[in-house]
């Protein structure tokens, strides 16, 4: 009896929490927008993870928090540029969990904001490991540091881990076939260090990004590139040292910062990013007119329906098909942020891109990463737009499994074989692949790679020989890909909109209405997706991303996926 009573109490408490969070969710979404005072500044508190497209879920809504998303930040800066009530922009910068392409896009948005004649400020309290964030800060008119604050600007790079020896000790053997020498997604498990091709690719990516970084700092801070390199080599700056080095413009406490943000001696009122997000773009003459679809494809690619921060082929194909059939939609922008995944699922999405391209303009806007399967779903577009630090290409295929037989033996786990079919247990973890099976797997991968190359050649108007030369699994930065013909333009979402207008015959100075997919993340998706995210181990973010992707892709055997330890810090 007592047990039943406790179960009932637990159920009622759980039901009450769900009810409260649902109410909080809808309150966050539909409450009235705030009033913006005549003399205000927009404050963007940028720290933590930045997703491409994020909506409140039941956990964050309960605390009144909305996750940071590129779309929301971009739209708020667009609004603030046109809003006469907003006099300046303040970026409060902390550690950002995103890669360089998102940083560059935010930086471009700030630079565009300044074209209105309004000023932008960056405020930093303390900044260890801050190269990406400092690069963003240099778009502002003034960079302000707390008088005792650390500023660490020490360059790009780090350590690339290899787990083969650890796996050998555990009795785990990684058995993978790949195409070709630059397809290094599993080198971290099959090698003890860089192969020559792997090292060449990594040095090319890091070197290209470092050059771009140094050039950007040089132009923004009025110093030669050699001076910037010397500053980076010194690395650590605190308070006065950062000011003397010319890395910051002022050292101010919080109360002194408030005095800086004035217009003609009058203190400005603050409006936060969360508050300003409730201001409708249409109230400022934005986001109206002819319709352009903006479809987000983020995360690892798998067959079926999308789940939290993943790209399901059925979901994306349905969205693209809907945009194609909607006569009111004049063009499509496909925003891709994905390391790839299932080759078959990627091809399902590619097919819808091809069909839609025949009827209306189709533009791909690449974010941090659009490689392997992420490139597969992009390559048929009329135009591909990428940021200079975007990671793309990785035209290659990989497949295989982990052989755990020795680990099972160490743990005392035994098994008995019962199969009908010579290769029924080919992908079992209880045994390794035979040479015959490896040959079969390699041939299958080569066949898919050939299809990949054929579609790259068709989509990018090049022959297969050139596609193969640019392929072999090699990852390129966006600026490299532009020179090689793998992408068409350098830029972000704003550039993609400009191209969509041009191809659709819409005047460039005319506003368009963005019809965004996904419109909302469903309650169940938010609940179970966030539950999954909250149960992650506290590991290196790249290792977490790798494990999460394996969970999504575990049903597939042949993947078009990028390496995970490639993103420069």
Image (tube, grey):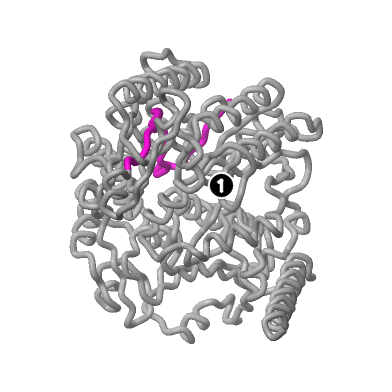
Horizontal placement of 394 versus 276: left or right?
left
**Residue drawn at x 73%, y 30% as measured from the top left:** 324
Q: Is residue 218 visible?
A: no
In the rendering, at what x and y percent does residue 515 appear?
Answer: 73, 44
Q: Residue 244 at x, y = what percent?
A: 25, 72
Please tell me which residue lies in front, 361 or 297.
297
- For residue 193, side relative to residue 106 (left or right): left
Q: Residue at x 23, y 60 (%)?
A: 232
| Label 1 secondary element | loop
Where does the C terminus fall, quadrant-wise?
bottom left
Identify the residue at horizontal 38%, vertical 20% (top origin): 446
Q: Position of residue 43 (x, y in %)?
A: 57, 70
Q: Can you say whether 559 is above or below 310 in the image?
A: above
The residue wearing badge 1 is: 310
Given residues 294 and 412, the one toward you in this image is 412
The residue lying at 36 percent from left, 25 percent from top is: 471
Q: Which residues are magenta?
A: 382-403
Q: Quadrant of residue 29?
A: bottom right
């Amino acid at each position: 009896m007592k047990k039943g009573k406790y179960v009932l109490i637990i159920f009622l408490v759980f039901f009450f929490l769900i009810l409260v969070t649902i109410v909080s969710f809808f309150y966050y979404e539909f409450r009235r927008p705030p009033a913006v005072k005549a003399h205000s500044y927009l404050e963007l508190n940028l720290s933590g993870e930045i997703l491409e497209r994020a909506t409140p879920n039941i956990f964050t809504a309960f605390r009144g928090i909305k996750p940071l998303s590129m779309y929301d930040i971009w739209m708020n800066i667009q609004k603030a540029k046109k809003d006469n009530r907003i006099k300046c922009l303040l970026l409060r910068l902390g550690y950002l969990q995103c890669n360089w392409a998102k940083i560059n896009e935010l930086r471009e948005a700030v630079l565009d904001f300044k074209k209105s004649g309004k000023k932008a400020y960056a405020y930093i309290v303390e900044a260890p490991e801050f190269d990406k964030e400092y690069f963003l800060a240099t778009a502002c008119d003034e960079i302000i540091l707390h008088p005792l604050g650390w500023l660490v600007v020490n360059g790009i790079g780090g350590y690339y881990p290899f787990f083969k020896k650890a796996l050998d000790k555990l009795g785990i053997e990684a058995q993978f076939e790949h195409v070709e020498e630059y397809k290094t997604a599993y080198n971290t498990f099959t090698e003890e260090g860089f192969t020559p091709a792997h090292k060449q690719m990594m040095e090319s990516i890091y070197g290209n990004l470092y050059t771009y970084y140094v050039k950007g700092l040089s132009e923004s801070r009025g110093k030669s590139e050699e001076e910037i390199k010397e500053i980076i080599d010194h690395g650590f700056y605190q308070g006065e040292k950062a000011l003397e080095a010319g890395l910051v413009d002022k050292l101010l406490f919080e109360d002194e910062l408030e005095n800086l943000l004035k217009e003609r001696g009058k203190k400005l009122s603050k409006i936060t990013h969360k508050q300003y997000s409730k201001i409708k773009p249409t109230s400022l003459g934005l986001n109206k007119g002819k319709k352009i679809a903006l479809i987000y494809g983020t995360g690892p690619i798998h067959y079926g329906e999308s789940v939290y921060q993943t790209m399901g082929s059925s979901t994306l194909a349905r969205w693209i098909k809907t945009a194609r059939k909607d006569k009111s939609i004049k063009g499509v922008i496909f925003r891709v942020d994905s390391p790839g995944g299932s080759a078959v699922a990627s091809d399902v999405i590619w097919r819808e891109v091809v069909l839609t391209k025949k009827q209306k303009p189709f533009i791909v806007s690449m974010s941090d990463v659009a490689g392997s399967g992420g490139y597969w779903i992009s390559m048929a577009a009329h135009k591909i737009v990428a940021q200079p630090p975007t990671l793309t290409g990785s035209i290659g295929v990989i497949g295989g499994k982990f052989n755990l037989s020795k680990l099972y033996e160490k743990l005392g786990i035994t098994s008995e074989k019962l199969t009908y079919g010579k290769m029924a247990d080919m992908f079992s973890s209880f045994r390794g692949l035979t040479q015959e099976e490896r040959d079969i797997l390699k041939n299958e991968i080569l066949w898919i790679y050939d299809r990949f190359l054929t579609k790259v050649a068709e989509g990018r108007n090049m022959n297969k020989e050139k596609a193969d030369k640019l392929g072999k699994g090699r990852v390129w930065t966006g600026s490299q890909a532009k020179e090689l013909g793998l992408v068409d333009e350098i830029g972000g979402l704003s550039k993609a909109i400009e191209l969509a207008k041009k191809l659709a015959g819409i005047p460039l100075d005319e506003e368009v209405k963005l019809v965004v997919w996904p419109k909302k993340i469903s309650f169940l998706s938010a609940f179970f997706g966030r539950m999954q995210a909250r149960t992650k181990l506290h590991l290196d973010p790249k290792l977490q991303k790798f494990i999460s992707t394996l969970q999504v892709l575990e049903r597939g055997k042949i993947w078009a996926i990028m390496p995970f330890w490639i993103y420069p810090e």
